[in-house]
Amino acid sequence: MPFNIIRADITKVSADAIINAANESLLGGGGVDGAIHRAAGPGLLEECRTLGGCRTGEAKATKGYNLDSKFVIHTVGPIWRGGRNGEESLLRSCYRNSFELAVKLGCESVAFPLISAGVYGYPLREAISIATDEAKKFLNENDIEITMVVFDRSSFDISAERFTDIRRYIDDAYAEEQKRADGRRTAFSNRAAAAAPSALRRENKLFAGRLKASESVCMSENVCDDLSAADMFAERDESFSQALLRMIDERGMTDAQTYKLANIDRKLFSKIRGDTHYKPKKQTAVAFAVALKLDLPETEKFLAKAGYALSNSLDFDLIIKYHIAHGIYDIFVINEALFRFDQTLLGQN
Ligand code: APR
C-alpha cells in the first residue's frame, strides 16, 4: 500500500529506511531520537559524529546498524513557536528532503514518526495533515511505500467534530438496523399468535431459529435489502475488473491516476488489468469505488461484482458509507478516520 498508517514503535518497523526526529547536533536525545539510537547501537552515534550536525528542515542519512532498516534518515523538525516563524515550511521540507533522500538511496519503503509533534510541540492535528499532505504529493511523482508510524493512540487524532459526526452516523445506523430486526421479529410472532397455537409452537421455534440465522446473514452482508437477486444476476457477465476498466475509460481517467487515488501500487493494478476474473480484497474494491467517486448505489453494484456489500452493522462499512454520503473521496482522509476507529485502511494490504 503506497501510504499506510500503523501504530508501532518505529525501531521495530522493517522498512528500507526509517526517519528520525533528531536535533541539530545529531548526537541523540530523548523521544524517538533516543529510542532509535538505543536500538541501533553505538555505531549510529559514531557515524552521526562524522556528519557535522544537520540544519532544521534538512535531512542526512546513516546506516541502520542493529535496526531492521538499511538506513536511518535524520531530519530536524522546527520547534513550535506559535506558527509565525516559518514552522510549516520547515516541517514540510523535513518530509520532502527525507523522502527524496530515501529515493536517492534506492529505498522502496520508508517509515516516519510525526516529526516535531513531541518535545518540539507542533500541534498534533497540523503535524498529521502536513505529514500526510507531503506524503501524498511525493507519491504522486514517486513509486515508494510510505508508512506513518504512530507511537500511541493518543498521539493520533482526527478533528473532534469529524470524529463525533462519524460516531453519530454509526450509532444511528445501528439503531436503524436494530429497529428493522425487531420489526421482522414482531411481524412473525403476530402471524404465529393468530394461527392455531398447538401445531404452531413447533413451527414457531423452527422459524425463529431460521429467522435468527437469516438475520445474521442479512445483518452481516445486507445483501437481502440492498440488492435483489435479479440485480446480482442481471449484470453477472461483467466482472469486477471489466467494470473497473470500463468506468476508468468512461471517466477519461488514466490508470496511474486511478491507482494513486485508490492507494494501490502499480504492480497490483497491472495484475488486476491483466486478469478479468481478479478477486480483490474488500478494502481494495472499496478503494477503487472511492477513486472513481462512485455514489452509494453505484458502489453497492460495483462491490457486488466482487461479492461484497456495505452493511449497516460493521464499523468499516459505515465509515465508508459516511464518507461517500458526504462526498468525501480523499482516500487519505478516509484512511485517517479508519485508523482512528481501529479499522483496516483502504488500498491494498
Ligand atoms: N516510535 C514511533 N514514534 C515515536 C516513538 C517511537 N519509538 N517515540 C516517540 N514517538 C513519537 C512521539 O509520540 C511524537 O509523536 O514521535 C513523535 C516525535 O516526538 P519526539 O521524539 O519528541 O520528536 P520531536 O517532537 O521532533 O522533538 C525532537 O526531541 O528527542 C528529542 O533529540 C530530539 O531534540 C530532539 C527533539
Image (cartoon, helix red, strand yellow):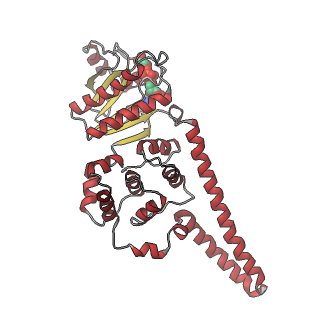
Q: Is residue 29 visible?
A: no
> What residue is shown at x 73% (from left), y 84% (from top)?
200
> What residue is shown at x 37% (from left), y 73% (from top)?
236
In the image, taking residue 80 as reference, residue 173 lies left or right, namely right
> What residue is shown at x 29% (from left), y 26% (from top)?
97
Coordinates of residue 271 in the picture (x, y in percent): 26, 57
Who is closer to the viewer here, 259 or 13? 259
Who is closer to the viewer here, 233 or 60? 233
Up-down relation of residue 159 to residue 338 (above or below):
above
Q: Is residue 322 visible?
A: yes
In the image, taking residue 330 as reference, residue 144 lies left or right, namely left
Coordinates of residue 106 in the picture (x, y in percent): 21, 34
Q: Disc count in the image?
A: 0
Question: Which corner quadrant of the figure contains ligand 1?
Answer: top left
Coordinates of residue 59 in the picture (x, y in percent): 29, 22
Up-down relation of residue 281 to residue 305 (above or below):
above
Query: Residue 84 lies in what quarter of the image?
Result: top left
Query: Residue 69 lies in what quarter of the image?
Result: top left
Coordinates of residue 211 in the picture (x, y in percent): 63, 73
> What residue is shown at x 51% (from left), y 54% (from top)?
321
Query: Residue 66 lies in what quarter of the image?
Result: top left
